[in-house]
Image (cartoon, rainbow, N blue to C red):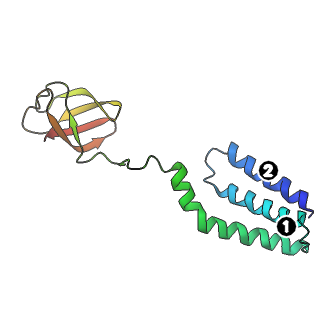
Amino acid sequence: MSWWSWMILGALLLGAEMVAIDAQFYLVFLGVSAFLVGFAGMIGIVLPEWMQWVAFAVMALVFMFTFRKSLYEKIRGGAQGFKGTMLDESLTVTTDIAPGADARIKHRGSDWTALNVGEAEIPNGSRAKVVKVDGLTLHISAD
């Protein structure tokens, strides 16, 4: 294939990554590999067609196995320092919650239903510990 064909293939693969719902960066490395094979042809490195395809495949596999996981985690992995679970987190209760009762609270910038699963009342302004997360309900007990 000519060098410009590889460049077009690379652009199509990168474009497909942008419109795909969640391609998880596989197409990025295929596109970059196609661009590199095209760039080699553009600067005058002439390879037989079978060798171009082998170079494309090898580079794509090497890039995927070497860089994909770390790049995907950096871009899509969430904020640094963000804990994925809320178990054992401490939060401030903004209303009195009797044992077995529930109330609406704010935690991590969202509204939650907090269910007091402990045996003691949790007074307004005190701290409570998350013992279980069930959907949008936090099961809490006095800290």
Q: Position of residue 97 (x, y in %)?
A: 14, 28
On the rendered structure, is 76 left or right of 63?
A: left
Q: Nearer the viewer, residue 39 or 62?
A: 39
Q: Residue at x 79, y 73 (%)?
A: 54
Q: Is residue 40 above or below residue 76?
A: below
Q: Is residue 26 above or below residue 107?
A: below
Q: Secondary structure at mark 1?
A: helix
On the rendered structure, is 27 left or right of 52?
A: left
Q: Quadrant of residue 142?
A: top left
**How many C-alpha atoms fall within 10 Å of the one at disc 1: few (<14), some, or many (≥20)?**
some
**How many C-alpha atoms fall within 10 Å of the one at disc 2: few (<14), some, or many (≥20)?**
some
Amino acid under disc 2 = Leu
Q: Nearer the viewer, residue 31 or 135?
A: 31
Can you tell which of label 1 and label 2 is closer to the viewer? 1
Q: Position of residue 32 (x, y in %)?
A: 73, 59
Q: Quadrant of residue 29?
A: bottom right
Q: Residue at x 35, y 49 (%)?
A: 83
**C-alpha span from label 1 to label 2:** 18 Å
Residue under numbered circle 2: 12
Q: Tell me, for residue 134, which label it has, or none.
A: none
Amino acid under disc 1 = Ala
Q: Looking at the image, tell me whether mark 1 or mark 2 is earlier in sequence order.
A: 2
Residue under numbered circle 1: 40
User: Which image quarter holds the N terminus?
Assistant: bottom right
Q: Residue at x 91, y 74 (%)?
A: 48
Q: Position of residue 66 (x, y in %)?
A: 60, 68
Q: Residue furthest front?
A: 43
On the rendered structure, is 81 left or right of 72?
A: left
User: Which image quarter holds the C terminus?
Assistant: top left
